[in-house]
Amino acid sequence: MAEAFRFLAQSSFGPTPSEVAAVRARGIAAYLEDQFTQPLSFYPDAQYTYFGLRATPDCNNKDPAGNNYPASAPQAICYRDNLTPARVQRQFFSNAVTQPDQLRQRVGALSQIVVVSTVERDLAVAYVLARYQNILAEAAFGNFEDLLRRVTLSPAMGNWLDMVNNDKPNASGSRVPNENYAREVLQLFSIGVSELKIDGTPLLDAQGNRIATYDQPDIREFARVFTGWTYPSADGSPPRGKNPAFYAAPMAPYPNGHDTNAKELLEDFRIPAGQSIQKDLDDAIHNIFMHPNVGPFIGKQLIKRLVTGNPSPAYVARVAGAFNDNGQGVRGDMKAVLSAILLDPEARQPDSDPNFGQLREPVLMVTALLRTWNATTDGVGLSDRTASLGQRVYSPPSVFNYYPAEYTIPGSSLAGAEFGIHNTASAVARSNLVYTLIYSGIAVNPTVPNAAGTRIDTALFQALSATPAAMVDEMNNLLLGGRLPAFARDVIVQSVAQVPATNRVERARMALYLMASSYYFQVQH
């Protein structure tokens, strides 16, 4: 059971009893293959559509005199569900807790690598945010080169990192292309700032210094590649100039905006003059994709998001090797990369290394708790709760994500990115959130379609509450895969025994609260 539980902790939003049974019955490799075939459960385009929201009278949360409508008014509901991220955020939690395509959703961790954020007001719109997240979901099991290309042409990314309406330089040199996307696609989305060995450790020069993967001239050259793209036309026609904001399709070229001169990119690769704008972009993406850093750089980040904050160089090398060649001569096959990550001996090793694993992000803490007990949830209010712990869904504060990727746990040499938003205050807030979810849940909001609120049912354990040891042992199996140490188990049993035996609900809730607020649950091993 422990092996199946651990695998699901790494590949889903939390193990459930039924999924643990399925993994044990079928085996990890077969279960993984089945996950690759699960239908997409993200944000259907038909449900997240563009219309003239800001100009539509029934989607304005103020009356003509400027007074706010009550939250239950149709105008305010329309505004909330279309002109804020709220609907997407609540569906994220609903999907994560209930939908079967768990691995695809979990690999949505790519959204913490190729970041856009609703801190940019124009992206804090339901259809805009949904369309970008769908790119990551659809490409999660495809080829990384295609993912890079689609992200590059996303109008949401174009807005976020200033590639949209990016003009070619003029003859006088007074106008130069914006370099923001060129810099971040290299630094954060693909190769990083230092040359790497295949095992993710830095290559050093003869003086023992790191070797830069790119320099400022490289950024200027890529910035010239990324010129001449605008928002797509709402009617699908080719742009006649720079279009107003529209996010329902990839960016499109606008006339005379692209620099068609020759460009020199990474590894002395040269784009000849006179190519089409699409050919220039495809060549540039391929040039990045073929850089030897991509496998170890992206592979290590995915290991750290799914499995452990401190993978060995050998583990990174094996995953990078799968990125470089899936066994059939294909580079960038994400299925091969994910299989290498999740089937690696280091991921599947027994729970013995105290430095292995990671602090559960606030979102993963919540979803794992809810999934274990087959909780009822419509996702409402959960993003607000995790925001108090430093992680509002789809709203990282910058392109660098919620926390520094290479954050080191204070007082140690261990990498632990999630600890970058964890402190004494958030430790207390985590316990308080666990308490809220177990004891009161989140009330039904009648303004939300199919409202259900969030509720954990402890009835299963109330029947065992007369024997606290048996109840705690069963909770240990379901919530922790049986890895609660004997001394901690005894403390919880003794605490529960202090509650009158007639109060079965309180006994069950106390046991679950003490276990879920402990770091045996808060840390994923």
Image (spheres, grey):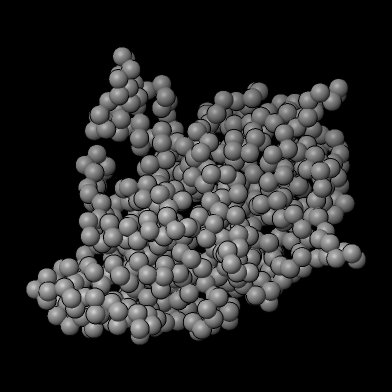
Residue 444 at x, y percent in the picture: 22, 47
The quadrant of the image that shows the N terminus is bottom left
Residue 322 at x, y percent in the picture: 66, 71
Which of 355 and 121 lies nearest the eye of the viewer?
Answer: 355
Note whether 426 is above or below 73 in the view shown.
below
Instruction: Judge from the rendering whether residue 206 lies leftward or rightward of residue 371; answer left or right.
Output: right
Residue positioned 57% across, 48% down in the render:
115
Instruction: Judge from the rendering whether residue 156 lies leftward or rightward of residue 27; answer left or right.
Output: right
Find residue 227 and report its image quarter.
top right
Instruction: Judge from the rendering whether residue 238 lies leftward or rightward of residue 59; answer left or right.
Output: right
- Check the image and name the residue furthest to the right: 206
Disc count in the image? 0
Which of 425 and 169 lies nearest the eye of the viewer?
Answer: 425
Instruction: Judge from the rendering whether residue 405 lies leftward or rightward of residue 105; answer left or right.
Output: right
Find residue 522 and report its image quarter.
bottom left
Residue positioned 38% across, 83% down in the render:
485
Residue positioned 60% across, 59% down in the render:
407
Note whether 35 is above or below 152 in the view shown.
below
- Would residue 351 be seen by someone viewing this image from the given angle? yes
Residue 108 at x, y percent in the picture: 51, 56
Note whether 142 is above or below 64 in the view shown.
below
- Check the image and name the residue furthest to the top: 65
- Would residue 16 be seen by someone viewing this image from the given angle? no
Residue positioned 43% across, 79% down in the render:
4
Residue 105 at x, y percent in the picture: 46, 59
